[in-house]
Image: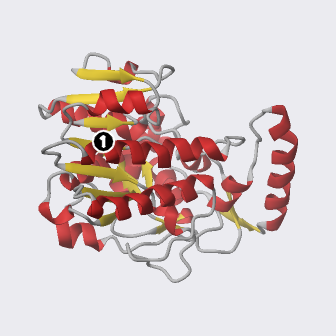
Amino acid sequence: MLVTGATGFTGSALTRKLCERGARVRAIARASSNMDALAGLPVEWVRGDVFDPATVATAMAGVDTVFHVAAAYRESGLADEVYHRVHVDSTRLLAEAAARTAGFRRFVHVSTVGVHGHIETPPADETYRFSPGDAYQRTKAEAELWLREYAPRHALPFTVIRPAAIYGPGDRRLLKIFKMATAPVVPLIGHSRGLYHLIHVDDLTEILLLAAVHPAAAGEAFIAGDPAALTLAEIVRTIAAELGRTPRFVRLPAWPFFLLADLCEAVCRPLRVAPPIYRRRVAFFTKDRSFDTGKLRTRLGYRYRRTTEQGLRETTRWYVEHGWIKGGRAGAAS
């Protein structure tokens, strides 16, 4: 089995599970990738870029299942062409190689719920229109749409998984929300409800493993998120409760923050400096992303390993124990 993005947060969790369950695992890793998290595991490493034809050709030899997890995560100043290479070009190279492989079983393609953009009439399901809002989402949508057109014409078995916001012990991308919960006053920007679906990395990797083998997953797309969406305030309250805190929320208008973000990006981009605030981060507080995730349960029979509250509390304790956030009364007790 080939895993792309194996050194990332989700990819490393998936790779560990595959190794623990006796799979023969090959993984693509850039020359600069840190593989310490997977040290000692029986992984066959192919060093190179996932969009490099020679690297892909080497990595795909003899593979019967692909987990295409690799992603270029949003960073200020990252050129659009980088997103295109990592998301679109890599998908094309891997899928074409898979289609030429005799006995190939399943191409599990990891997209994102971000392809749907802001959900105007929540909850949305897998058939909701695509409305990507930035280069990351646009190229993820382009890659998925290309695959869904290519695969049937070339008898390539595939499944698309669109994860919601991924979290869990060790994650740094949503760490900012956990840090917000340690403050006595928490700002909420804009006037939308701020609905978000979360998915614990343990559940997401189980969903990926199921999608690789379940007959009913073939040719289908699945939104991978917990059963219910939460508001940002509800997420923060749950984290704060584990810390023994009671935050106070202050609602602020969004437009001054968008203006400040645009200014920061305009000044910082030429200097190749990460801006302290940028438009995408502000937009995080102003969008609603609520989904009907029932297809996973009805079509594949998936049962979640934890509730959102359990996952948030567990992750909060991990952050406290590892010194990533400061604990309150509950954190100190753990």
Q: Find disc 1 in the rendering and name its residue.
A: 97
Question: Does residue 164 appear anywhere in the picture?
Answer: no
Say which of 194 and 129 sits in front.
Answer: 129
Counting other residues with Cα less than 10 Å from the Cα at mark 1, is it few (<14), some (14-19), or many (20 or more)? some
Q: Position of residue 185 (x, y in %)?
A: 68, 55
* Quadrant of the image containing the C terminus: top left
Q: Is residue 122 left or right of residue 37?
A: right
* Quadrant of the image containing the N terminus: top left
Say which of 127 and 237 sits in front.
Answer: 127
The image quadrant of residue 112 is: bottom left
As drawn, the residue found furthest toward the bottom would be 121
Say which of 115 and 13 sits in front.
Answer: 115
Q: Position of residue 25 (x, y in %)?
A: 22, 30
Residue lying at 11% horizontally and 31% vertically, measured from the top left? 22
Element under disc 1: helix
Question: Does residue 130 appear anywhere in the picture?
Answer: yes
Q: Position of residue 311 (x, y in %)?
A: 35, 51
The three-letter code of the residue at mark 1 reads: Ala
Q: Is residue 257 left or right of residue 110?
A: right
Where 319 sits versus 111, above or below?
above
Residue lying at 57% horizontally and 59% vertically, measured from the top left? 138
Residue lying at 26% horizontally and 48% vertically, measured from the top left? 99
As drawn, the residue found furthest toward the top would be 40
Residue lying at 81% horizontally and 46% vertically, measured from the top left? 265
The image quadrant of residue 158 is: bottom left
